[in-house]
Image: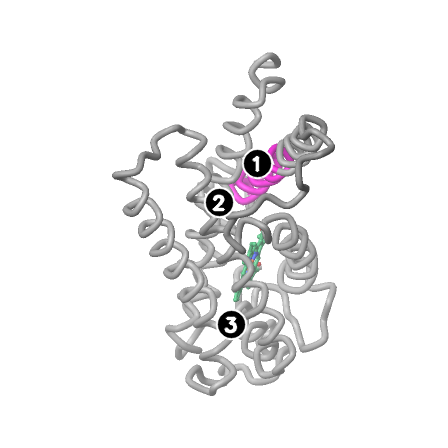
Amino acid sequence: MREFWDSTIGKKVFVAVGGTILVAYLVLHMAGNLWSLAGPGTVEPHIDEYASWLRNFGEPLVPYEGTLWVVRAILLAALVVHLVGVIQLRARNRKARPPEYPARRIGRSWESRLMMVSGVVILVFLVVHILQFSTLTIDVTPLVEGAIYANLYWAFQEWYVVLFYLVAVFLVGTHLRHAIWSVFQTLGVDSPERNGQIKAGASLLTVVIVAGFAAVPILFFTGALGVPIDNEPTAAVLAGGGGQ
Ligand code: HEM
Protein backbone atom coordinates (compact mmCIF):
# COMPACT_ATOMS: atom_id res chain seq x y z
CA MET A 1 0.00 0.00 0.00
CA ARG A 2 2.78 2.41 1.03
CA GLU A 3 4.69 1.63 -2.15
CA PHE A 4 1.56 2.24 -4.23
CA TRP A 5 0.98 5.62 -2.52
CA ASP A 6 4.61 6.58 -3.15
CA SER A 7 4.36 5.89 -6.88
CA THR A 8 2.99 8.69 -9.09
CA ILE A 9 0.26 6.52 -10.60
CA GLY A 10 -0.68 5.20 -7.12
CA LYS A 11 -1.04 8.74 -5.83
CA LYS A 12 -3.19 9.63 -8.85
CA VAL A 13 -5.44 6.66 -8.13
CA PHE A 14 -5.78 7.71 -4.46
CA VAL A 15 -6.62 11.29 -5.54
CA ALA A 16 -9.19 9.91 -7.99
CA VAL A 17 -10.77 7.53 -5.43
CA GLY A 18 -10.92 10.30 -2.79
CA GLY A 19 -12.43 12.68 -5.34
CA THR A 20 -14.99 10.08 -6.44
CA ILE A 21 -16.18 9.63 -2.84
CA LEU A 22 -16.55 13.42 -2.57
CA VAL A 23 -18.52 13.56 -5.85
CA ALA A 24 -20.80 10.74 -4.63
CA TYR A 25 -21.48 12.80 -1.49
CA LEU A 26 -22.18 15.89 -3.63
CA VAL A 27 -24.78 13.99 -5.67
CA LEU A 28 -26.50 12.72 -2.50
CA HIS A 29 -26.30 16.14 -0.82
CA MET A 30 -27.73 17.88 -3.88
CA ALA A 31 -30.56 15.34 -4.13
CA GLY A 32 -31.28 15.69 -0.39
CA ASN A 33 -31.42 19.50 -0.72
CA LEU A 34 -34.13 19.14 -3.35
CA TRP A 35 -36.50 18.12 -0.52
CA SER A 36 -36.68 21.85 0.22
CA LEU A 37 -38.54 22.29 -3.09
CA ALA A 38 -41.48 20.49 -1.45
CA GLY A 39 -42.02 23.75 0.43
CA PRO A 40 -42.84 24.53 4.05
CA GLY A 41 -45.44 21.74 4.34
CA THR A 42 -48.42 21.86 6.70
CA VAL A 43 -46.90 20.28 9.81
CA GLU A 44 -43.17 19.97 9.20
CA PRO A 45 -41.15 20.71 6.04
CA HIS A 46 -40.07 17.57 4.17
CA ILE A 47 -36.43 18.63 4.27
CA ASP A 48 -36.56 18.79 8.09
CA GLU A 49 -38.06 15.30 8.18
CA TYR A 50 -35.30 14.13 5.85
CA ALA A 51 -32.58 15.66 8.07
CA SER A 52 -34.16 13.98 11.07
CA TRP A 53 -34.30 10.64 9.24
CA LEU A 54 -30.56 10.94 8.44
CA ARG A 55 -29.78 11.47 12.11
CA ASN A 56 -31.92 8.54 13.21
CA PHE A 57 -30.66 6.23 10.47
CA GLY A 58 -29.99 2.69 11.76
CA GLU A 59 -31.63 3.23 15.17
CA PRO A 60 -31.94 1.36 17.51
CA LEU A 61 -28.97 -0.73 16.29
CA VAL A 62 -26.89 2.39 15.61
CA PRO A 63 -26.86 5.25 18.15
CA TYR A 64 -28.44 8.63 17.28
CA GLU A 65 -26.31 10.39 14.60
CA GLY A 66 -24.07 7.28 14.46
CA THR A 67 -24.41 6.78 10.70
CA LEU A 68 -23.92 10.50 10.13
CA TRP A 69 -20.63 10.45 12.01
CA VAL A 70 -19.40 7.41 10.04
CA VAL A 71 -20.19 9.27 6.80
CA ARG A 72 -18.45 12.40 8.11
CA ALA A 73 -15.33 10.37 9.00
CA ILE A 74 -15.24 8.77 5.52
CA LEU A 75 -15.66 12.18 3.88
CA LEU A 76 -12.92 13.75 5.95
CA ALA A 77 -10.55 10.87 5.13
CA ALA A 78 -11.42 11.16 1.42
CA LEU A 79 -10.80 14.92 1.52
CA VAL A 80 -7.43 14.58 3.29
CA VAL A 81 -6.22 11.86 0.87
CA HIS A 82 -7.40 13.95 -2.09
CA LEU A 83 -5.68 17.14 -0.86
CA VAL A 84 -2.40 15.57 0.28
CA GLY A 85 -2.21 13.58 -2.97
CA VAL A 86 -2.80 16.67 -5.12
CA ILE A 87 -0.24 18.76 -3.23
CA GLN A 88 2.41 16.02 -3.43
CA LEU A 89 1.78 15.36 -7.12
CA ARG A 90 2.10 19.06 -7.87
CA ALA A 91 5.37 19.29 -5.94
CA ARG A 92 6.66 16.22 -7.83
CA ASN A 93 5.67 17.76 -11.18
CA ARG A 94 7.46 21.00 -10.37
CA LYS A 95 10.66 19.18 -9.38
CA ALA A 96 10.58 17.09 -12.56
CA ARG A 97 10.14 20.11 -14.84
CA PRO A 98 13.42 21.24 -16.48
CA PRO A 99 14.16 24.94 -15.78
CA GLU A 100 13.87 25.90 -19.47
CA TYR A 101 10.40 24.34 -19.73
CA PRO A 102 7.61 26.94 -19.52
CA ALA A 103 5.72 26.95 -16.21
CA ARG A 104 2.40 27.33 -18.04
CA ARG A 105 1.66 24.53 -20.44
CA ILE A 106 -0.01 25.62 -23.65
CA GLY A 107 -3.24 23.97 -24.75
CA ARG A 108 -4.70 23.33 -21.32
CA SER A 109 -8.37 24.20 -20.85
CA TRP A 110 -9.23 27.18 -18.62
CA GLU A 111 -10.84 24.72 -16.18
CA SER A 112 -7.63 22.75 -15.93
CA ARG A 113 -5.67 25.95 -15.13
CA LEU A 114 -8.32 26.86 -12.60
CA MET A 115 -8.18 23.53 -10.70
CA MET A 116 -5.90 24.71 -7.89
CA VAL A 117 -7.66 28.09 -7.55
CA SER A 118 -11.15 26.58 -7.61
CA GLY A 119 -10.03 23.86 -5.18
CA VAL A 120 -8.79 26.40 -2.64
CA VAL A 121 -11.92 28.58 -2.98
CA ILE A 122 -14.15 25.48 -2.59
CA LEU A 123 -12.27 24.61 0.61
CA VAL A 124 -12.86 28.11 2.01
CA PHE A 125 -16.53 27.86 0.98
CA LEU A 126 -16.81 24.48 2.70
CA VAL A 127 -15.53 25.84 6.01
CA VAL A 128 -17.88 28.86 5.86
CA HIS A 129 -20.77 26.62 4.75
CA ILE A 130 -20.35 24.11 7.59
CA LEU A 131 -19.98 26.98 10.09
CA GLN A 132 -23.24 28.41 8.74
CA PHE A 133 -25.64 25.51 8.23
CA SER A 134 -24.10 22.65 10.23
CA THR A 135 -22.68 24.20 13.38
CA LEU A 136 -24.89 27.33 13.07
CA THR A 137 -21.92 29.50 14.11
CA ILE A 138 -22.16 32.07 11.29
CA ASP A 139 -25.66 33.35 11.95
CA VAL A 140 -25.95 36.39 9.69
CA THR A 141 -29.61 35.32 9.35
CA PRO A 142 -31.70 33.47 11.98
CA LEU A 143 -30.62 29.83 12.42
CA VAL A 144 -32.29 27.14 14.51
CA GLU A 145 -31.03 23.60 15.07
CA GLY A 146 -33.01 21.09 13.01
CA ALA A 147 -35.09 23.76 11.25
CA ILE A 148 -33.35 23.25 7.90
CA TYR A 149 -36.13 24.75 5.74
CA ALA A 150 -36.43 27.89 7.84
CA ASN A 151 -32.63 28.26 8.01
CA LEU A 152 -32.37 28.05 4.22
CA TYR A 153 -35.39 30.33 3.75
CA TRP A 154 -33.99 33.16 5.87
CA ALA A 155 -30.43 32.80 4.56
CA PHE A 156 -31.53 32.92 0.93
CA GLN A 157 -33.62 36.07 1.40
CA GLU A 158 -30.26 37.91 1.40
CA TRP A 159 -28.82 38.62 -2.04
CA TYR A 160 -25.22 38.37 -0.82
CA VAL A 161 -25.76 34.88 0.62
CA VAL A 162 -27.41 33.80 -2.66
CA LEU A 163 -24.53 35.27 -4.68
CA PHE A 164 -21.94 33.58 -2.44
CA TYR A 165 -23.63 30.18 -2.91
CA LEU A 166 -24.10 30.58 -6.66
CA VAL A 167 -20.44 31.52 -7.19
CA ALA A 168 -19.33 28.58 -5.02
CA VAL A 169 -21.60 26.14 -6.84
CA PHE A 170 -20.33 27.41 -10.22
CA LEU A 171 -16.73 26.84 -9.09
CA VAL A 172 -17.64 23.37 -7.82
CA GLY A 173 -18.99 22.76 -11.34
CA THR A 174 -15.79 23.81 -13.14
CA HIS A 175 -13.71 21.76 -10.69
CA LEU A 176 -15.95 18.76 -11.12
CA ARG A 177 -16.09 18.71 -14.91
CA HIS A 178 -12.34 18.67 -15.20
CA ALA A 179 -11.97 16.24 -12.29
CA ILE A 180 -14.38 13.66 -13.76
CA TRP A 181 -12.51 13.84 -17.05
CA SER A 182 -9.16 13.40 -15.23
CA VAL A 183 -10.44 10.31 -13.38
CA PHE A 184 -11.02 8.58 -16.73
CA GLN A 185 -7.51 9.54 -17.85
CA THR A 186 -6.02 8.21 -14.60
CA LEU A 187 -7.89 4.95 -15.02
CA GLY A 188 -6.52 4.80 -18.56
CA VAL A 189 -9.92 4.26 -20.15
CA ASP A 190 -9.71 7.38 -22.31
CA SER A 191 -9.16 6.94 -26.04
CA PRO A 192 -9.66 9.19 -29.09
CA GLU A 193 -12.91 7.37 -29.95
CA ARG A 194 -14.31 7.54 -26.44
CA ASN A 195 -13.11 10.99 -25.34
CA GLY A 196 -16.09 12.81 -26.84
CA GLN A 197 -18.51 10.60 -24.90
CA ILE A 198 -16.51 10.87 -21.66
CA LYS A 199 -16.42 14.67 -21.92
CA ALA A 200 -20.14 14.82 -22.70
CA GLY A 201 -20.90 12.54 -19.71
CA ALA A 202 -18.71 14.70 -17.43
CA SER A 203 -20.53 17.84 -18.64
CA LEU A 204 -23.96 16.28 -18.14
CA LEU A 205 -23.23 15.13 -14.57
CA THR A 206 -21.79 18.58 -13.80
CA VAL A 207 -24.83 20.40 -15.19
CA VAL A 208 -27.18 18.18 -13.14
CA ILE A 209 -25.21 18.77 -9.92
CA VAL A 210 -24.81 22.54 -10.49
CA ALA A 211 -28.47 23.03 -11.52
CA GLY A 212 -29.69 20.94 -8.57
CA PHE A 213 -27.66 22.95 -6.05
CA ALA A 214 -28.32 26.35 -7.66
CA ALA A 215 -32.10 25.78 -7.81
CA VAL A 216 -32.40 25.96 -4.01
CA PRO A 217 -31.05 29.51 -3.36
CA ILE A 218 -32.68 30.80 -6.57
CA LEU A 219 -36.15 29.46 -5.71
CA PHE A 220 -35.99 30.74 -2.13
CA PHE A 221 -34.79 34.18 -3.25
CA THR A 222 -37.41 34.57 -5.98
CA GLY A 223 -40.20 33.72 -3.56
CA ALA A 224 -41.16 30.49 -5.32
CA LEU A 225 -40.78 28.68 -1.98
CA GLY A 226 -43.09 29.79 0.81
CA VAL A 227 -42.40 31.30 4.21
CA PRO A 228 -41.81 28.64 6.91
CA ILE A 229 -45.06 27.96 8.79
CA ASP A 230 -43.36 28.69 12.08
CA ASN A 231 -42.45 32.11 10.83
CA GLU A 232 -40.65 33.02 14.03
CA PRO A 233 -37.44 30.94 14.15
CA THR A 234 -37.81 30.16 17.86
CA ALA A 235 -41.36 28.95 17.33
CA ALA A 236 -40.00 26.26 15.02
CA VAL A 237 -38.13 24.75 17.93
CA LEU A 238 -41.00 25.05 20.38
CA ALA A 239 -43.25 23.29 17.88
CA GLY A 240 -40.71 20.48 17.56
CA GLY A 241 -39.64 21.42 14.01
CA GLY A 242 -36.56 19.49 12.85
CA GLY A 243 -35.11 16.30 14.12
CA GLN A 244 -33.03 17.39 17.07
C1 HEM B 1 -26.81 25.80 -2.75
C2 HEM B 1 -26.01 24.85 -2.34
C3 HEM B 1 -26.06 24.20 -0.98
C4 HEM B 1 -27.04 24.20 -0.02
C5 HEM B 1 -28.39 24.87 -0.06
C6 HEM B 1 -26.55 23.39 1.08
C7 HEM B 1 -27.24 23.16 2.25
C8 HEM B 1 -26.73 22.52 3.37
C9 HEM B 1 -27.41 22.38 4.65
C10 HEM B 1 -28.79 22.91 4.96
C11 HEM B 1 -26.59 21.68 5.47
C12 HEM B 1 -26.89 21.25 6.94
C13 HEM B 1 -27.60 19.93 6.86
C14 HEM B 1 -28.01 19.36 8.20
O1 HEM B 1 -27.67 19.92 9.26
O2 HEM B 1 -28.66 18.32 8.20
C15 HEM B 1 -25.39 21.39 4.73
C16 HEM B 1 -24.30 20.69 5.23
C17 HEM B 1 -23.18 20.39 4.51
N1 HEM B 1 -22.90 20.72 3.19
FE1 HEM B 1 -24.12 21.78 1.98
N2 HEM B 1 -25.31 22.91 0.76
C18 HEM B 1 -24.97 23.39 -0.49
C19 HEM B 1 -23.80 23.15 -1.18
C20 HEM B 1 -22.76 22.37 -0.72
C21 HEM B 1 -21.56 22.09 -1.46
C22 HEM B 1 -21.28 22.61 -2.87
C23 HEM B 1 -20.79 21.30 -0.67
C24 HEM B 1 -19.41 20.74 -0.94
C25 HEM B 1 -18.51 21.33 -1.67
C26 HEM B 1 -21.50 21.09 0.57
C27 HEM B 1 -21.05 20.34 1.62
C28 HEM B 1 -21.68 20.21 2.84
C29 HEM B 1 -21.12 19.50 3.98
C30 HEM B 1 -19.79 18.76 4.02
C31 HEM B 1 -22.05 19.62 5.03
C32 HEM B 1 -21.92 19.09 6.47
C33 HEM B 1 -22.73 17.84 6.60
C34 HEM B 1 -22.73 17.36 8.03
O3 HEM B 1 -22.90 18.17 8.97
O4 HEM B 1 -22.56 16.17 8.22
N3 HEM B 1 -22.70 21.75 0.51
N4 HEM B 1 -25.51 21.90 3.47
Q: Quadrant of the C terminus?
A: bottom right
Whether residue 151 sits left or right of residue 201 in the image: it is right
The answer to whether mark 1 is within 8 Å of ligand 1 is no
Q: Which mark is residue 179?
A: 2
Considering the whole magenta stretch, tell me its main secondary structure: helix
Kind of element beneath mark 2: helix
| Label 1 packing within 10 angstroms: few (<14), some (14-19), many (20+) | many
Q: Amino acid at mark 2?
A: Ala
Label 3 sits on residue: 149
Highlighted range, magenta: 66-82
Does residue 70 show up magenta in the picture? yes
Could you tell me residue 172's position as x and y percent?
Answer: 53, 57
Label 1 sits on residue: 78
Q: Residue at x 35, y 48 (%)?
A: 199
Q: Residue at x 58, y 42 (%)?
A: 72
Mark 2 vs mark 1: which is more N-terminal?
1
Q: Amino acid at mark 3?
A: Tyr
